[in-house]
Image (cartoon, rainbow, N blue to C red):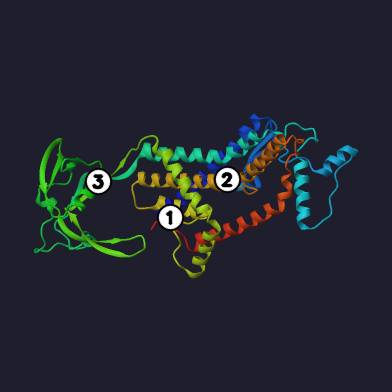
Amino acid sequence: MEILAFVVGVALMVVGLAVSIALHELGHLWPAKKFGVRVGQYMIGFGPTLWSRRRGETQYGFKAIPLGGYISMAGMYPPSPALQQAQAAGGRAGRAAGGFFATMVQDARVANDETMQGEEDTRVFYRLPIHKRIIVMLGGPLMNFLFAVVLFTVLFSAIGLQTATTTVARLSECVPATTSTSTTSECTASDPTAPAAAAGIEPGDTIVSIDGEPVADFTEATAIIRSSPGEQLRFVIDRDGEQHTVQVTPATVETTVTAADGSTTTEEVGFVGIGPTVEYVKQPIWAGPEAAVQQVGAVAGIIWQLPAKVWNTAADLVTGEPRDPNGPLSIVGAGRLSGEVAAADAPVLNRVAGFLSLLASLNIALFVFNLIPLLPLDGGHIAVALWEGIKRVWAKVFRRPPPKPVDATKLVPLTFIVVIALIVMGAVLVLADIFNPVTLG
C-alpha cells in the first residue's frame, strides 16, 4: 500500500509539472497570438510526438519527454543577411563556410528564416514593439508565478496553516530536569507535579489569556510562560463554553540555547507542562500571495548561487555527506519528495497540503529560473529586447538613424555554452537525487 501511495505521489507530480509547463507556454501563446504573431506549434514536452492536432495555423500536441515545452513563433530574429541578399537576387540563401560556432550561427539563422514568409512578413516576433516582445516573453514565467499564488492561496486560505493552538491536548505529569527531557523521561515518585496539572487545567481547555494578556496561539502563550519562571500567573481558560481563572506558577527548568555562531549556552526558563492541539487554521486571503513573494526571494537567493550549490551537491554525492535540504533539486528529486509525501503516515489532508506546497514551490522556481537574463531562457529574450530598446532610445536622443533590429543569432555560441552548463548541472542534480536524495526526514 505504501509503494502504491508513493507511485501515486510521483504520478501526481508528473501531472502537476505538465500543467505547469502547459500554463507557462500558454502565457507565451496567448499574447503572441493577440499581437498577431504567427505561431506554428504549441508543444508540451520534447522528443517524439505522442499526439497532436492542428487548429488553424497552430499545431497543438504532447511529446514523449515531459521535461519542458515550447511554442514556435515566426521570426524570433530578423532575417539573416544571406536571406536578404538571396531574395534581392531572386534566389535561395546558401550555407556559409566557417568553424563550429560559425556553423551554429548559420544553422540558427536558417531555422529562423524558415519560419518567415519573406523579408516583408509582418506577422513575425522581431517586428513587434519592444514592450509587446517583453510581454510575450514575460507571459510564461508570470503564469508560473500566478499558478503558485493560486496553489498557496488554496493551501493557506482553503486548507489552512498547521498551527499550535491554545487548546490543551495533553499535560505533563511532572517537572523535568531540563526541557530536553520533558518528553523522554518517565516521572518518579520524587518528581514534583507539573504546574498546569497541579492547578487543575485539563485536556480540552482553551487558554484565553495569561496575566490579562490575550494569547492567540501557543507561541504567544509559551513566550509568556518561558519568561516567567517562579512567578505566579493568572490563566483564564475556557472549558465547555465557561471561563475559569486559575493560578499557575511556572517551574524553573534549564534549556540549551544555540547562538547563530553555533555556540551553546544554558538558561533558566518557565515550564508548566502543557502540550498544544495542532489544527489547520485558515489564513487571510492575502496569505497566499505573500507566501509566493517570500518564496521568490528565497529561490532567488539559491539561483544566483546555483553553480556553487550544484558543486557542493556534487561534492556531497562523492563523499556521501548529507545534502543541504535547502539546496536545488531536479525533477527527479521533486517527484521523489512528492512520492514520500503521498506515502507518509499522516492524515490525507496533511499529504494534500504537502503536495500543494511542493508544486507551488516548483512553480516559483520555474518563475525565477526562467527570468535569468541568458539565452535560451525567457530572461535572455527579454534582455535582448531591452538592449534593442536602449539602442533605439540612444539613437533618438542623439538624432541618429533608427538602429537595425538586434540579431540575437550572433549569441548562439553563448547560448550553446549556457545549454551545456544547464545539462551538466541538471545531470549532477539528477544523480544526487537518485543516490544521495533529500528526504522528508
Q: Are marks 1 and 3 in contact (CB under 8 Å)?
A: no
Q: As rendered, which of 223 and 218 lies closer to the eye?
A: 223
Q: Amino acid at mark 1?
A: Ile
Residue 220 is marked as 3
Q: Residue at x 45, y 51 (%)?
A: 338
* Residue denoted by label 2: 371
Q: Position of residue 237 (x, y in %)?
A: 15, 41
3D distance between C-alphas at marks 1 and 2: 37 Å
Q: Amino acid at mark 3?
A: Glu
Residue 6, placed above or below residue 20: below
* Residue denoted by label 1: 3
Disc on the earlier residue, 3 or 2 = 3
Q: Position of residue 22 (x, y in %)?
A: 57, 40
Residue 304 is marked as none
Q: Residue at x 41, y 38 (%)?
A: 154
Disc on the earlier residue, 1 or 3 = 1
Q: Nearer the viewer, mark 1 or mark 2?
A: 2
28 to the left or right of 184: right
Quadrant of the drawing holding the C terminus: bottom left
Q: Position of residue 149 (x, y in %)?
A: 46, 39
Q: Amino acid at mark 2?
A: Leu
Query: Dot 2: within a 10 Å radius of its alpha carbon, few (fewer than 14), some, or many (20 or more) residues?
Result: many
